[in-house]
Image (spheres, rainbow, N blue to C red):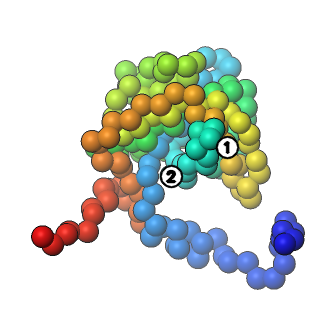
Amino acid sequence: MRSASPEVTGRVVGRQDFARAFRVVPAAVSVVLARTESGLVRGITCTSVSSLSGVPPMALFSVDRKTRFADELRSAGHYSINILAADRPDWARAFARGGQSLDDLAHAIQTGRGPVPTLASGTAAVLECEVAGIYPGGDHEVVTGRITHLRVQSDAPVLQYRNGEYGVFCAEARSS
């Protein structure tokens, strides 16, 4: 089977329709952290984290090209994916505001088991990753990473984002 050409052939869905369709899909909220060449910790809020491979353990996420975060990851070589606990929407908002000081969250950032900054608390899981590859994806870049360390807090519900709001997924009630 031949893969489709990267050139657009035929009609393309408009950006607003695309965004409206995906706004209704709940997604786990993560903060991705890396240390820049100058030693500063930089982070972004992300809802595109996904598992990629079990052997070797890998994860992926996408990042808007405008942030230049992928360039920083190329230089850093390592990063962490911090899947936020449901009680941390304020942290998600803080890391979503590009260019603003995160000094009030400095207490929450620690060095992980490897050479990467992680969130010390407020997470359902933390994945420490080594950059495996960064690939173009339209107006985003897709970052793949080999998971080198992880910690899971299994009893913490995960923060989710849907229709512009943060919240928690509620499982369907089961009748007894």
Few, some or many residues within 10 Å of mark 1 (<14, 14–19, 20+): many
Q: Identify the element where label 2 is drawn.
A: loop
- Mark 2 or mark 1: which comes first in sequence? 2
170, above or below 39, in the image: below
Q: Is residue 61 visible?
A: no
Residue 12, percent from left and from top: 73, 78
Badge 2 is on which residue? 47
Q: Is residue 9 left or right of residue 54?
A: right
Q: Is residue 118 left or right of residue 58?
A: left
Few, some or many residues within 10 Å of mark 2 (<14, 14–19, 20+): some
Q: Identify the element where label 1 is drawn.
A: strand
Q: Are marks 2 and 1 in contact (CB under 8 Å)?
A: no
Nearer-the-camera pick, 101 or 36? 36
Q: CA distance from mark 2 to mark 1?
A: 13 Å
23, above or below 156, in the image: below
Q: How many badges with numbers are in the image?
A: 2
Residue at point 58% right, 33% down?
147
Q: Amino acid at mark 1?
A: Val
Residue 93, percent from left and from top: 42, 45
Residue at point 41% right, 57% down?
161
Nearer-the-camera pick, 139 or 169? 169
Residue 152, percent from left and from top: 38, 35
Q: Is residue 51 visible?
A: yes
Residue at point 87% right, 71% down?
2
Q: Quadrant of the C terminus?
A: bottom left
Badge 1 is on which residue? 143
